[in-house]
Amino acid sequence: PQLGQVLPDQPELKIIRRKIPGFVGFANLPKQWHRKSIRRGFTFNLLVVSQKGLGKSTLINTLFNKDLDSIGESNPNAVAEKLEGTGLEDGEENAASLHTNEGSGESNLHSNVKINAATTTIEENGVNLKLTVVDTPGFGDAIDNTDSWKPIVDEINLRFDQYLDSENRINRTFEDDNRIHACLYFIEPTAHLLKPLDIEFCKQVHEKCNLIPVIAKSDILTEEEINVFKRRIRRQLDEAQVQLFQPPQYSLDDEESIQASRELYEKLPYAVVGSTEVVVSRDGRQVRGRSYPWGVIEVDNSNHCDFVYLRDMLVSQYLEELRERTNKVLYEKYRSEKLTRLGIKQDNSVFKEFDPDMRQKEEKQLHEAKLAKLEAEMKTVFHQKVSEKEKKLQKSEAELFSRHKEMKEKLTKQLKALEDKKRQLESSVNNPAPPSPAQPKKKGFLR
Ligand code: GDP
């Protein structure tokens, strides 16, 4: 079905006719998820990677219809706030609230890129979404950005490792899923080509997280420029064998949905425009958009930009698929490669069914491998210590020996001197010297 879309402050508005079927807004997640999960709430960890000034903060605020800037500052003292609703749902109560601002303050300094993660819980129509935005300030902002991607890849790996550890704990809880479920990558609207850093970053992360690239601030480009730019970007990414997130079609049963999902993939990278400002369109409607002398660009209008496609892909249609692919494909790949590195035999089919016995066996092997590693490390340290001690002992033994030798020589010398003296004395006692003749007294003026 097509939906007329209504912004929260202008309930009478009917502005957008979108081709994409289905609903928008995460309040629809119950339709995607199991009932049990609903009670627990949902976790979604979004990695945003952008050079400064490409409109990242604005776009995130536009997506969740709230000034989320403060969460990026990792402020642990922030109080519960009211979130005005995402405005993404027609005719329903959009009571969304920002419960906590945990501001994990995780920061990881590697070259000049920092990692800031901050979490908010957003509630919409009784559905809780624990959203963590992982920001990477400093990415691409230095003169030499060759290794800018490294700290980000480290962060993704670290989050996988944490999850792997939590899986191996006896009293495990899977509530804390800190794995990155999607990565929003901002491309500078140059209308030219991707930069080497863009390609390198995509290559480094595409097998670790669901990659969704966007052309930032696309309102500065013409439609034709966007189309040409998109084609070039897709070609460059294809050549680099980078895989973008593709909505799966196995869960879809009607041709219309399949077509829509295909279109969502084909439209990548999304040419987005961000704005939380409400402006008046030429025909008098109040819309979220950017106003120019020549007219208004509407954020939520798919004829004006790709923002609605992004929202569908990320929040309202495929959030669960993003999480599922993270778990079943990306994490499994990481996990099995890691276990293989540790010398643990793996069943390589990433789609293998969950088998508790098998999992338990693997966990035991992992635990044993860890213990063996620890033991080997302890042994090495022990041997090192022993050999150090031995060397020390050898050294002091040699010192002792040479001191002993020195002393012996000294004593021998003394003994010899004493014997000489003794002999002299004895001979002087046995042969007393005759008295010496008296010396004639010298005459002279020196007397
Ligand atoms: P960040 O540094 O990437 O977080 O960028 P900001 O969101 O702070 O935006 C930087 C500047 O770009 C601000 O002046 C925004 O108003 C402006 N901006 C953000 N999004 C857009 C957009 O889609 N189009 C245009 N033309 N400007 C934008």
Image (tube, helix red, strand yellow):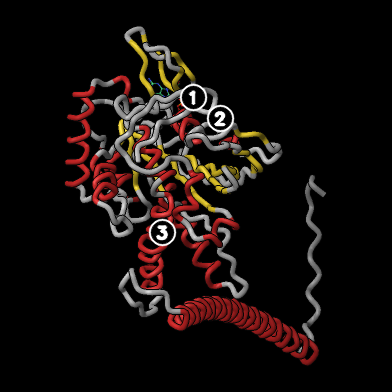
Residue at 55%, 56% (x, y): give it: 38
Could one spot residue 438 in this view of the protein? Answer: yes
User: Residue drawn at (48%, 35%), measured in percent from left and top?
Assistant: 90
Where is the N terminus found, in terms of image quarters? top left
In front of the other: 298 or 343: 298
* Res 187 seen here: no
Name the residue type under label 3: Glu
Query: What residue appears at the point 32 percent right and 30 percent down from the top-left corner?
Result: 302
User: Which residue, given by chain and number where applicable, does mark 3 sit on?
Assistant: 324
Q: What residue type is labelled 1?
A: Thr
Is ligand 1 closer than 8 angstroms to the Cβ of mark 3? no
Q: Quadrant of residue 422?
A: bottom right
Q: In front here: 287 or 290? A: 287
Q: How crowded is mark 3: few (under 14 residues within 10 Å), some or many (20 or more)?
A: some
Q: Decide if residue 217 is on the left or right side of residue 166.
A: left
Which SS class for mark 1? loop
Residue, disc 1:
276
In whole angstroms, how far apart are the C-alphas of marks 3 and 1?
Answer: 30 Å
SS at badge 3: helix
Image position of 269 with respect to 242: above or below? above
Cα separation between marks 3 and 2? 28 Å
Count of marks, rendered view: 3
